[in-house]
Amino acid sequence: MGVNERLPLLAAQAAPPIPLATLAMLFLRIGCTSVGGFMAMVSVTQNVIVERRRLLPASDLLDGLALASVLPGPVAINVVAYTGYRLRGVAGAAVAMLCAVLPAFLCIVALGSLYFRFGGMDAVRPIFQGITPAIVAVVLAAGCRLWSAAVGSRRQAMLGAGAAILLTAVPGLPTTLAVMAAAAAVGCRYHRQQAQAAALERAPAAAPPRMPSPLVLAAVLAPLAVLSWLALHSSALLKLAAVFAGMSLLTFGGGYVFIPLLQHTVVDAYGWLTPRQFVDGLALTQLSPGPVMISSAFVGLKVAGVAGAAAASAGMFIPSAVLMIAASGAMQRIRGSATVQAALCGVRAALAGMVFSAAFAIARLAAPAWPSFLICALALLALVRFRIDAAWVVACAALAGWLVF
């Protein structure tokens, strides 16, 4: 690597770490605008962290997405935890995850409280009918950016296109794992030279701090300590936290794979929800930002109020995030390996294709009417041509939905 090529890398290393307060505000914005499933949150994270603030390279975020895709738990929150860890270590991961989940949690608690009191949610549905096509545009725009960063050859383009087609035709965890394994094998076979250059470029990068200061650690762990105390004094809270922690560590492949397990557990096994309440709870998650797994807050709210929602959400998100952070540390220690980089050359291309598959899946949730197509097209134009912030695009789409539908 020449002197001129090393200057940006050295400048990035010399830059001061992002303040935790700034990180919190960024992920609050991400959490507020991530309506439409896990890939929507990943796409908005890519837009804010990679494109606008340039805090991480696109390849780094794709590495996190690859790791989150093969670990249990909510993919989006695991990617958020990985991003926070890369920026500010363990404290950054905790702050990023808390702030990304908080808007969805508050939304579900508010909507769930109204639902359990009045039993209806039709009044707000037009807003989200406008938001859904805008989220399709957000995901498509992110897919285009990730494609340009990850695909540099005909073989990688074939990997990406094949992944998009396969995941659209046969969605699910087995297909995802098979595609990623095949992409890694192709990368190891055909991208060794490209990987050696990437490994040399990444080797000098500074590792994130392993542990935060005692004061920051105490601030991060204080809410967990309070929640643990409440759990010890309430069998219902303890049961909620334990049940959802178990489901978190048994769920691979994202939120939609989680739905059958959730139904069996909360409807059949424990009787916490009726079948009708279960379906309505899933509908509410589609009308709120954040991942499908925030439905844990809806269940906890029904069982034990707001404290129950907090206990169920903590059990749902914290165990898999801890596992993700531990795996992230291992990835940083081996990312200088040419073999690992070769595999990632293939995996990143496949993941870029999977983003387009996710956009198609979200598009099927949109209202099949001409306003949906118009909102999607205008949102995509605003994001790609004029580079307008996704938060403003989603807000305008919500207003359009309220006026049109």
Image (cartoon, grey):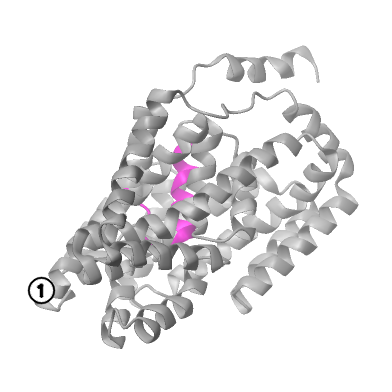
Residue 209, compared with residue 150, is above or below; it is: above
Quarter of the picture containing the C terminus is bottom left
Residue 330 picture location, percent across and down: 69, 41
**Towards the viewer: 160 or 109:** 109
Q: Residue under circle 1? A: 117
Quarter of the picture containing the N terminus is top right
Is there any visible trace of residue 349 in the rendered image? Answer: yes
**Towards the viewer: 4 or 41:** 41
What is the chief secondary structure element of the magenta stretch? Answer: helix
Residue 22, compared with residue 391, is above or below; it is: above
Residue at the image position 38 percent from the left and 41 percent from the top: 27
**Towards the viewer: 236 or 279:** 236
Asked if residue 227 lies left or right of residue 148, the reply is: left
Asked if residue 320 lies left or right of residue 133, the reply is: right
Residue 172 picture location, percent across and down: 60, 74
Is there any visible trace of residue 55 in the rendered image? Answer: no
Residue at the image position 29 percent from the left and 74 percent from the top: 281
Range of magenta residues:
32-49
Query: Dividing the picture into quarters, in which one does residue 8 lie?
Result: top right
Mark 1 element type: helix
Residue at the image position 55 percent from the left and 68 percent from the top: 250
Residue 373 magenta-highlighted: no
Residue 150 picture location, percent across and down: 68, 47
Residue occupying the far front of the picture: 233
